[in-house]
Amino acid sequence: MSSTTSAPNMAPRDTVPPLLRSACLLLVVFNFAMIPAMYFDHAWLFDTNGRFIHTDFLNIWAAGKLALDGQPALAWNWDIHKQVQVAMLGQSYVGDYAWHYPPPFLFVAMFLAHFSYATGLVGWAAASFVPYMAMMRAVVGQRFGLMVGAAFPVVLANTMAGQNGFLTAALLGGTLVLMPTRPILSGICLGLLSYKPQYGVLFPLVLIAASQWTVFFGAAVTTAALALMSWIAFGTDSWQAFFHWMPMFSQAFFTEGRATFFKLQSVFGLVRTMGGSEQVAWMFQWIISGTVLVCVIMLWRSRADYVLKAAALAAGTLLLTPYLFLYDLMVLAIPVGLLLRIGLADGFRRGELTALACAMGLLIAFPFFEMPLGLGSTLIVAALIARRVVNAFAEERVLPREIAAAG
């Protein structure tokens, strides 16, 4: 991709370092071997008594069931929402799988609730995996991107939980891939991503700074259309319920830590995990968010290569929000894929692949440590992008001097 937001022109080499290919293949085999292994071990979908095992997918299925029953606004009521889940499972559980998405996402939930819990979970994971893989193929720029996408360590966690990480990554990556050549489609992808409001801060500001008005207005129109459709389908009560219950969600996640703080893969989550107060956590989060905001906007206003801009925006989006769980880190596959794209075309910098391996290792290790290791992965990837940016600007300054000296 060129230095401006134009059509991709980088053609990655067909040759992939053997060690990189072998590592990705190993992770692919692991990811896809663990799915049936956990199923037959009664650790996924059904327990030893044949009852459903509760996962994050419960909140989607139960919200969809309430919408099908003509009571969509009750999906945001924690008590009623859990009653639907318990009735379906045939048993209770500790904690909550609360519904906190904007009303438009009820369209997806309502469709999935037509199926049984297990069928809906498997179908949702499989269906959302397809556009994610197509996006990764486009991001890396060759078929090796399919292997990279399937090898990403969060694939297993997102599949087991029946979460929306594949869809989120597909839409965010689609926005970036399509922006140079298909700005209207790019804006539609970004508008569809509005079901994740926490991603709605950095993108609009970057689009304004880079004068990407077609993408900006495409996203705005799509978001408004989704909101209107959901208002017509689910009524005013659903939107009122969404805004009414939002403070409770904030209280539960950021103040009380009901989901446990170490699961928040953000600076906020790290500070709270280490015993810091909520005020201190917010202070550090605002510092990192402000820094990311300024740096990414400045980069997008520069003449830097579009691949680096896209990678920085994807990674910056993750660093900007305090509300970030492991499945959300499917988005990290995008900047990783873009770094691989650059490396395959121009050669990898010293230590780059080792650093990426460390980032992936932290994601793999997360289930064994009660620490937000995913934040470390994001910071490593962000540092690699920053190094590429700094080196690119340094080379750009040195070249004219060499030409002048030669003259």
Image: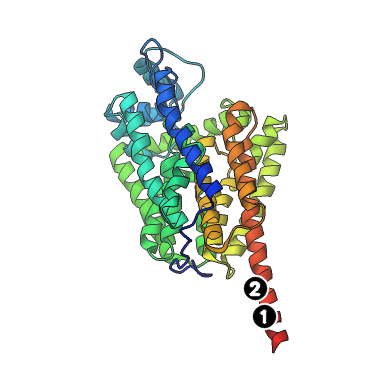
| Residue 336 appearing in the image | yes
Residue occupying the point 51% across, 20% down: 95
Q: Provide the residue designation for mark 2.
A: 396
Q: Name the residue at the top extreme.
A: 49
Around disc 1, counting alpha carbons within 10 Å, would you say few (fewer than 14), some (14 to 19), or many (20 or more)? few
**Depicted 295 relative to depicted 320: above or below:** below
Q: Helix or strand or loop: what does disc 1 sit on? A: helix
* Amino acid type indicated by mark 2: Glu
Q: Residue at x 53, y 30 (%)?
A: 248
The answer to the question of whether label 2 and label 1 lie on touching residues, with beta carbons closer than 8 A, is yes
Q: Residue at the location (40% across, 46% down)?
A: 133
**Cα separation between marks 2 and 1:** 7 Å
Report which quarter residue 258 is drawn in. Answer: top right
Left of 401 or right of it: where is 113?
left
Q: Nearer the viewer, residue 349 or 43?
A: 349
Q: Nearer the viewer, residue 14 or 180?
A: 14
- Classify residue 147 as left or right of residue 286: left
- Compare residues 138 and 248 and report the one nearer the observer: 138
Place of residue 365 in the rendered image (x, y in percent of width and height, measured from the top left): 60, 32
Residue 190 appears anywhere in the view: no
Q: Residue furthest front?
A: 18
Disc 2 on helix, strand or loop?
Answer: helix
Q: x and y percent of residue 36 in the render?
A: 40, 26
Q: How many marks?
A: 2
Question: Based on the displayed image, in which of its 4 quarters is residue 81 positioned?
Answer: top left
The image shows residue 55 at horizontal and vertical percentages of 44, 25
> Of the residues shown, which amino acid type is indicated by label 1?
Pro
Mark 1 lies on residue:
400
